[in-house]
Image (tube, helix red, strand yellow):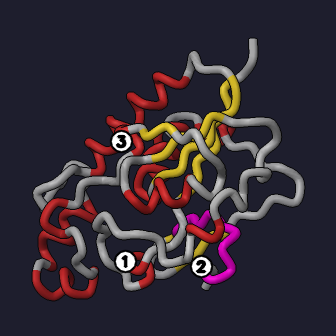
Amino acid sequence: MQATRLTLMCHARTVAQKLACFPTNEPLEMDWQSAKGSRCRQFKGTPRLLCGPELRTRQTAELFGDGVEIVAALADCDFGRWKGASLDDLQTSEPEMLQAWLNDPTSASHGGESVAQLGERVAAWLNTLEATPGHIVAITHPFVIRAALMQVLQGAAFNQIDVEPLSAIELRFNGRWRLRLMGTDPEGTH
């Protein structure tokens, strides 16, 4: 039986990410049209290519090839009325609501989707892939990737982490430890 291989990739950088704002349906910051297909040889064979419905994921997916399937379950978290708002502005205008949302995964202070609801959506999608052999590349969002990682790592996480030779992972501490998955975007590394 062939295994299911899922590669989750974050979309390319947007202005909203650069400005630390909650996303809207914004385009990529880069000139993606001239880079169409530029990463199509990144993977061996021809993986099944999926992406979320937002403009930024569709544009990023075109870097990897044609025949992209749009999957609603890969949509970004619904941030409700916080769409487009900066974290700095929310720390001033709605500090209690922002803190509640950061501390409680069931909170949807913004009127959109809670982190727990996002996790349930992503878990249901992952379950549908369990009987899908072959390589799947899914272009999606940081929140969706985090939700998928939380599904995989729950329980006995230690034995569910594969560390390949010469692989690297970065942990950063700024009041709390954070895991950083390193990308290949030279402008996105700080």
Quick one: label 1 or label 3, which is nearer the N terminus?
1
Q: Answer few, some or many: residues within 10 Å of disc 1's Cα (few below 14, many 20 plus, some between 14 and 19).
A: many
As drawn, the residue found furthest toward the top would be 1
Q: Answer few, some or many: residues within 10 Å of disc 2's Cα (few below 14, many 20 plus, some between 14 and 19).
A: few
Q: Which residue is mark 1?
A: 16
- Tell me the element at label 1: helix
Q: Quadrant of the C terminus?
A: bottom right
Q: Residue at x 49, y 37 (%)?
A: 69
Q: Position of residue 127 (x, y in %)?
A: 47, 24
Q: Residue at x 52, y 46 (%)?
A: 149
Q: Position of residue 163 (x, y in %)?
A: 78, 49
Q: Position of residue 156 (x, y in %)?
A: 58, 35
Quick one: label 2 or label 3, which is nearer the N terminus?
3
Q: Which residue is mark 2?
A: 188
Side (left or right) of 45 relative to 3: right
Residue 186 within the segment the image draws in magenta: yes
Kind of residue indicated by mark 3: Gly
Q: Nearer the viewer, residue 65 or 164?
A: 65
Side (left or right) of 98 relative to 125: left
Which-is-in-front pick, marks 1 and 3?
1
Side (left or right) of 152 relative to 26: right
Q: Which residue is mark 3?
A: 119
Quick one: label 1 or label 2, which is nearer the N terminus?
1
Q: Which residues are magenta?
A: 178-187
Q: Position of residue 104 (x, y in %)?
A: 24, 56
- Tell me the element at label 2: helix
Q: Residue at x 42, y 47 (%)?
A: 52
Q: Is residue 35 visible?
A: yes
Kind of residue indicated by mark 2: Gly
Q: Nearer the viewer, residue 174 or 58?
A: 58
Residue 60, compared with residue 75, is above or below; it is below
What distance separates the C-alpha of mark 2 from that of mark 3?
26 Å
